[in-house]
């Protein structure tokens, strides 16, 4: 496994990273009217802290935390990366979760903007649990489109309770799944309530619902719907899902959206294995069948 060394970021690190930024990160910097080295230098100098991620002594990324005003305000997280991050993706993702936890320990609200064309960064932010705005806003000086993203410090502990049909309406699902929402109301929601299912809450806010139900062919099928802000609570959610699945007898299948990588990763964490069977959801998404024996 690749080891990433994390050091306090210096201007030497900034000078090494600036000419080797991922194209999407460089485009984001220039869309804000800045040049890579100047943007890094300013962020390091004015922030609360900044750290360089090194792989084999080469700077793979610099991440930092600033404040929205000298008087305090909310935290402003930022990150610029090189292609090295793509080659060591799993290690970097693990480090980024720890970094996010540190940021939230220091400030209860993190807010910043991400270039609408930086699709990899947007996927990463959502995987971490950030709420990314659905519609972009034109930012100066060039009017480039940017999405606002934010995350709040978790309040309280994850509470797991029996699922109620109305819980589905309280989940703020990702835009990619909005087409499925009409399928999860009325008779469908009532049917799910009659099956073994649970809801996860943090301080009264629903962060996810999951369960399993019998199908007409005699199988057992798992289902889950998570709030777009569920990322910081995913460890507790995974444990709750595993406990629920441990009560099932025989194989369980799940239909996973092939276009949404976090769903596949969650299924594999829970012991599901992909099959070659494909289908389409009523709202037009491509689904792959996974099996847990």
Image (spheres, rainbow, N blue to C red):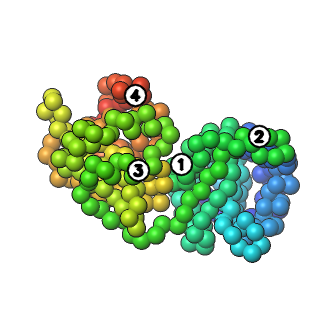
2 and 3 marks in contact (CB < 8 Å): no
Q: Which picture quadrant has residue 190?
A: top left
Task: Note whether 189 is above or below 179 in the view shown.
Answer: below
Residue 36 is left or right of residue 222, and the answer is: right
Q: Which picture quadrant has residue 250?
A: top left
Under tag 4, what secondary structure?
loop
Q: Earlier in the sequence, mark 1 or mark 3?
A: 1
Name the foreground residue: 282 vs 64.
282
- The numbered dot on residue 29 is none
Q: Earlier in the sequence, mark 2 or mark 4?
A: 2
Q: Position of residue 37 (x, y in %)?
A: 84, 53
**Viewer-nearest of discs 4 and 1:** 4
Q: Which residue is mark 4?
A: 283
Q: Position of residue 34 (x, y in %)?
A: 85, 49
Q: Position of residue 100 (x, y in %)?
A: 57, 62
**Viewer-nearest of discs 2 and 1:** 2
3D distance between C-alphas at marks 2 and 1: 21 Å
Q: Which residue is mark 1?
A: 126
Quarter of the picture containing the C terminus is: top left
Rendered residue at 60%/65% (across/down):
109
3D distance between C-alphas at marks 4 and 3: 18 Å
Q: Which residue is mark 2?
A: 144
Q: Earlier in the sequence, mark 4 or mark 3?
A: 3
Q: Earlier in the sequence, mark 2 or mark 3?
A: 2
Rendered residue at 73%/65% (across/down):
68
Name the foreground residue: 34 vs 153.
153
Q: Which residue is mark 3?
A: 171
Task: Note whether 56 is above or below 253 in the view shown.
Answer: below
């Amino acid at each position: 496994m690749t080891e990433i060394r994390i050091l306090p970021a210096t201007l030497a690190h900034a000078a090494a990273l600036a000419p080797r930024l991922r194209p999407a990160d460089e485009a984001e910097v220039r869309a804000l009217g800045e040049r890579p080295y100047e943007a890094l230098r300013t962020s390091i100098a004015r922030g609360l802290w900044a750290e360089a991620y090194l792989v084999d002594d080469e700077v793979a990324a610099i991440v930092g935390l600033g404040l929205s005003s000298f008087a305090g305000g909310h935290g402003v997280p930022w990150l610029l990366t090189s292609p090295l991050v793509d080659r060591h993706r799993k290690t970097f993702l693990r480090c980024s979760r720890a970094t996010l936890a540190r940021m939230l320990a220091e400030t209860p609200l993190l807010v910043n903007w991400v270039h609408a064309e930086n699709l990899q960064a947007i996927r990463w932010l959502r995987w971490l649990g950030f709420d990314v705005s659905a519609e972009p806003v034109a930012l100066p000086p060039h009017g480039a489109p940017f999405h606002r993203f934010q995350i709040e410090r978790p309040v309280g502990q994850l509470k797991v309770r029996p699922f109620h049909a109305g819980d589905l309406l309280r989940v703020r699902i990702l835009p990619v799944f909005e087409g499925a929402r009409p399928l999860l109301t009325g008779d469908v929601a009532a049917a799910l309530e009659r099956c073994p299912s649970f809801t996860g809450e943090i301080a009264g806010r629903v962060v996810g619902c999951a369960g399993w139900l019998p199908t007409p062919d005699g199988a057992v099928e798992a289902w889950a719907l998570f709030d777009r802000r569920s990322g910081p609570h995913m460890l507790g959610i995974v444990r709750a899902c595993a406990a629920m699945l441990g009560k099932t007898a025989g194989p369980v299948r799940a239909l996973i959206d092939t276009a949404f990588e976090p769903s596949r990763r969650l299924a594999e964490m829970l012991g599901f294995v992909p099959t070659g069977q494909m289908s389409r959801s009523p709202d037009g998404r491509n689904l792959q069948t996974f099996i847990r024996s």
